[in-house]
Amino acid sequence: MARLRARLLVLVVAAAAILVYPPDAHGFYLPGSYPHKYSPGEPLNVKVNSLTSIDTEIPFSYYSLPFCTPPEGVKDSAENLGELLMGDRIENSPYRFKMYTNESNVFLCRSAPLAPETFGLMRKRIDEMYQVNLILDNLPAIRYTKKDDYFLRWTGYPVGIRVGVDYYVFNHLQFTVLVHKYEEANVARVMGTGDATDDFPSRGKGGSAGSSSGWMVVGFEVVPCSIKHNPEDVKSLKLYGKYPSKIKCDPTTVSMSIKENEPIVYTYEVSFVESDIKWPSRWDAYLKMEGAKVHWFSILNSLMVIAFLAGIVFVILLRTVRRDLTRYEELDSEAQAQMNEELSGWKLVVSDVFRAPSNPMLLCVLVGDGVQILGMAVVTILFAALGFMSPASRGTLITGMLFFYLVLGILAGYAGVRVWKTIKCGDHSGWMAVSWRVACFFPGIAFLILTTLNFLLWGSQSTGAIPFSLFVILILLWFCISVPLTLVGGLLGAKAPHIEYPVRTNQIPREIPPQKYPSWLLVLGAGTLPFGTLFIELFFIMSSIWMGRVYYVFGFLFIVLLLLVIVCAEVSLVLTYMHLCVEDWKWWWKSFFSSGSVAIYIFLYSINYLVFDLKSLSGPVSATLYLGYSLFMAIAIMLATGTVGFISSFCFVHYLFSSVKAD
């Protein structure tokens, strides 16, 4: 489940991507991920990851179930910060292959008799549809199942299956490793970089370099089977010994039922198949999204509708403002006064429009945090689109997002204090308090939500729970990097010149006339248009997060989020203009929430997705975790979109009243 913490951050991203990955493209290169050439007979080690399920969304350790353990003992693979936050627990396994060496009837181990507690746990994991995740040469094991005339693609294989009242475990695995011949003379063509001088370090048998022959792993498939083995026949067998009888793997039948106080015998077989798939294209099977054409047409339709509506809104607004200004400047003083009374309510608030809002420090804090989230998102998606944070490099996306967020604290402090100084008309006193609140507000909310949810994961003994040592590291990163950089940014903002108002503000505020309708109702309803720009893409993203699929079409994400930023700016601008026209000069907070209210609809959509699309999600713990992460996502989106709306409205109001000649 904690991997969802990481993936949910992707929803907050307002992105810049320069590469659009079309569904029919092949042969892209993932920077930072290099091919490994294996000589025939060279050992291949399979690793295991956490057990996962879309039924509970709570990951558990692979060795929490009675599976075979490696002879050298269980060892954690090298993990980065992002992997820990995602809930990945990659460990070694007893599965051993030899490159281009087919093996069959390989005995792995005989488990201890299933104790009542272990037997109950196995049945529970089978009922909860938990999947076993294996990794070979950084490729997850993939499984194909046939449905009608097409094949469904799955990552991993189920622990077992329930038939009636009996539970069956998949104790025999049929592996297929797809390999591609290493071509020394065509390195540039294979890598797809066009740079023939850039060779890659290759290791032959025994680690020797420079050999011209070898194979690269380009696919890893698994077929799970339930085979009834006799535990008495393997008492004298050792690890990797030959099972005494021929094993025929038939995935359509199951026969190995689990029973209390009886052991389980595990076996496997492996075959190597030469493939035309080149190494740069080996992730195509994982990154290809289902229904690609529907995806394209849906996004295109959304783009056209939203662009048309946004264009109309922008043209109407531009023409209205220009017409009012032109007519206003052409009249004499008496005519201007009459026009003010009859037509132009927004010019009546010229002496109040820049009056300081209520709770100005909180507004500055929200804007500062929104700028930080927005900046982090742009930089992260830019690197992800270039391939530096690909799925092949587990954890790098989350590690990069965390790093950029920490570093961009300087931008958050600068923006928050600059707005504070502008509201205070050049007085920078209190900038330290603003900077400190900017550094602690959103991280504090995130820390509170994630800590509460982490206690639920700890109580479930899930690998998704963040270890206490990692909590200490995150707190140190927060207070040793983010907070100091935010204070530095605040100092720069305090020294920077404030934005001067084009008009003077009266000491006595003007009374706002009674409104025909509640202004906040209009503000909340304004979020529907920005939500309309992303709800189609949001479905694909939610399916990727909660259904365990890989989301890698950052080109789509870039287009949708670019439209989201534009529409948020225009919606906030239009709402601000409408409020000024009815002599409501309290536009500061309304401009922020008119675009930030899209987060409300995203959260409601998350609830709708939980009720209608995640019907299999079981248990109050899973539902609480889902709603907690959805709330965290909505808060981050509100800060980012609200900041876009506020900045656009401020620029518009400043431009509008700087064009008016007022006494």
Image: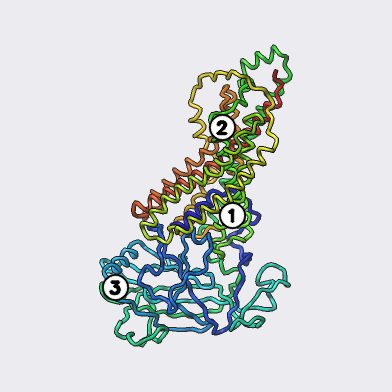
The image quadrant of residue 144 is bottom left
Front residue of this view, candidates 638 and 363: 363
Which dot, 3 or 2, sits closer to the camera?
Answer: 2
Question: Picture coordinates of residue 31 (x, y %)?
Answer: 63, 64
Secondary element at image label 2: helix
Give the residue drawn at x 44%, y 43%: 604
Secondary element at image label 3: loop
Question: Picture coordinates of residue 153 (x, y %)?
Answer: 47, 65
Q: Is residue 452 visible?
A: yes
Give the residue drawn at x 35%, y 55%: 618
**Residue under label 3:** 114
Sequence-first disc among 1 and 3? 3
Q: Cα distance, mark 3 to mark 2?
A: 64 Å
Q: Cα distance, mark 1 to mark 3?
A: 45 Å
- Image disc number at residue 403: 1
Question: Picture coordinates of residue 567 (x, y %)?
Answer: 59, 40
Residue 253, relative to residue 620: is it above or below? below
**Residue under label 2:** 360
Secondary element at image label 1: helix
Q: Dividing the image into 4 quarters, which one contains the N terminus?
A: bottom left
